[in-house]
Image (cartoon, rainbow, N blue to C red):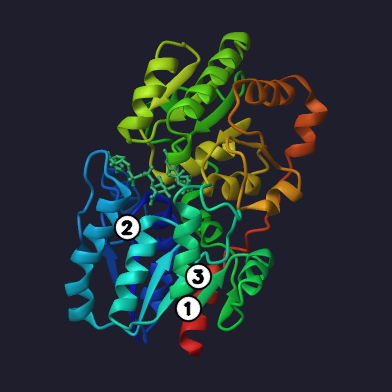
């Protein structure tokens, strides 16, 4: 069976590399890896960390790229590759424009599509934007569905998708086998200089398209207020390479001594940083799944989430994008140890680290 795996951004790579490594172990499977190159440096960091080599890289990334150019470049550049490789199945991941465009391109060649991380929904097509529509459309095109949780399976069922749905867990939990070490030494020197015992380290990330502009400014203002008020807190913010993110972040947070603005770190550094942090503030999807595994409270800098499992378990809280709401929520966890302890418990609704194995089994069973 020839399995053609496509991904293009950092989070897809982190969640697909463990699966690629498992596919490559199987004698009955030929695994071809195609990067769209929607991300460049941030994608390479992940490929290097997992030591996965791609067969194709469409290299589509442009500075300040638009959704239209991402979509059309992928459609045009992947067509000849699919025609040459003629795979039995194309696997895409999640909700990026890479996922949707690659699924559509496979459909145009009448190649079946398997969707890894299928069935996540907020119910609002503009939030997250454009991810909610990307995953809806990808699920319409797909014929195999690898749903991380039972809730995700229910979402698919409510849209009439009931066949070939496999609840596998999320492959992000598989990734920890490769990344987390108790005696880890960071490769980013700024992280090695942090004192995790005398200061409370808050890991912060924000990059989402719907947060660009005023919401991101609100987030930064709230963070600055907390940093100025709490000398024993150190914020670490690996800032996404998107210039629309960097312009605002460096403008508001550039000159605060206990806010460390660093370049994106590799996934080994990131997972080991999460394990040592006091708490996480983020608009990322992946971090909402990862941080609860380490028992770290997460404040989600968005108005909704497609990952309700950890919210229900009490370790993740959606706090919105208003300055005062973010400030008050962070302050509560810093001042009130009971509130902190209530959130700081390890839970794992996203699997047992064997999601990739289950996906491989499901593919072979067809
Ligand atoms: C994309 C995904 C989003 C995902 C995020 C993960 C879409 C529409 N968005 O959003 O779902 O959460 O990736 O990070 O698919 N850039 C670089 N180097 C890199 C990566 C990005 O310079 O390695 C810069 C480029 O100027 C690029 C910009 O960042 O134009 C935005 O990248 P893009 O992939 O369009 O959007 P993300 O916000 O990263
Ligand atoms: N991550 C990383 N380095 C960083 C920031 C994040 O390796 O500097 C990892 C993080 O641990 C998670 C993933 O990137 O696995 C999340 O990616 P991102 O926030 O870009 O996308 P999202 O999850 O929101 O789609």
Q: Which residue is mark 2?
A: 51
What residue lies at 40% left-to-right and 31% top-to-bottom? 239
Q: Which callout, 3 or 2, points to the residue nearer the camera? A: 3
- Residue 360: give its label: 1
Q: Which residue is mark 3?
A: 356
Cβ atoms at labels 1 and 3 below 8 Å apart: yes
Quarter holding the N terminus is bottom left
Q: Look at the numbered disc 1 and give the secondary structure of its residue.
A: helix
Position of residue 309 measured from the top left corner of the image (x, y, whole percent): 69, 54
Q: Which callout, 1 or 2, points to the residue nearer the camera? A: 1
Q: Look at the numbered disc 2 and give the secondary structure of its residue.
A: loop
Task: Find out if the beta carbon at label 2 lies less than 8 Å from the nearest ligand 2 atom.
Answer: no
Q: Look at the numbered disc 3 and give the secondary structure of its residue.
A: helix
Position of residue 35 measured from the top left corner of the image (x, y, whole percent): 27, 61
Query: Does 51 sit above or below residue 363?
Result: above
What residue lies at 33% left-to-right and 36% top-to-bottom? 242
Task: Find out if the beta carbon at label 1 lies less than 8 Å from the nearest ligand 2 atom.
Answer: no
Left or right: residue 58 versus residue 134 is left
């Amino acid at each position: 069976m020839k399995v053609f795996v496509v991904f293009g951004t950092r989070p897809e790579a982190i969640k697909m590399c463990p699966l690629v490594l498992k596919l490559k172990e199987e004698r009955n499977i030929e695994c071809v890896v195609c990067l769209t190159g929607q991300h460049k440096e941030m994608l390479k960091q992940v490929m290097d960390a997992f030591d996965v080599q791609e067969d194709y890289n469409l290299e589509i990334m442009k500075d300040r790229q638009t959704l239209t150019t991402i979509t059309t470049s992928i459609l045009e550049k992947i067509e000849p590759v699919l025609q040459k490789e003629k795979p039995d199945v194309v696997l895409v991941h999640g909700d990026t424009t890479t996922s949707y465009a690659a699924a559509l391109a496979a459909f145009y060649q009448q190649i079946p599509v398997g969707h890894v991380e299928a069935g996540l929904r907020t119910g609002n097509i503009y939030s997250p934007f454009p991810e909610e529509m990307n995953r809806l459309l990808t699920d319409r095109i797909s014929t195999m569905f690898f749903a991380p949780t039972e809730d995700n399976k229910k979402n698919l069922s409510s849209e009439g998708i009931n066949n070939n749905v496999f609840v596998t867990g999320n492959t992000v939990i598989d990734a920890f086998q490769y990344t987390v070490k108790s005696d880890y030494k960071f490769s980013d020197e700024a992280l090695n200089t942090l004192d995790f015992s005398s200061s409370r380290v808050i890991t912060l990330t924000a990059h989402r398209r719907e947060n660009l502009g005023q919401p991101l400014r609100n987030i930064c203002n709230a963070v600055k207020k907390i940093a100025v008020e709490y000398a024993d807190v150190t914020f670490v913010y690996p800032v996404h390479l998107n210039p629309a993110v960097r312009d605002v972040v460096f403008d508001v947070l550039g000159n605060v001594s206990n806010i460390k603005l660093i370049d994106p770190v590799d996934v080994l550094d990131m997972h080991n940083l999460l394990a040592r942090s006091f708490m996480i503030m983020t608009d990322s999807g992946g971090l909402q799944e990862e941080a609860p595994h380490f028992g770290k409270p997460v404040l989600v800098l968005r108005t909704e989430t497609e990952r309700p499992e950890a919210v229900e378990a009490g370790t993740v809280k959606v706090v919105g994008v208003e300055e005062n709401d973010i400030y008050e929520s962070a302050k509560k966890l810093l001042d009130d140890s009971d509130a902190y302890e209530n959130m700081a418990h390890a839970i794992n609704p996203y699997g047992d680290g064997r999601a990739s194995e289950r996906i491989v089994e499901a593919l072979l069973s067809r």
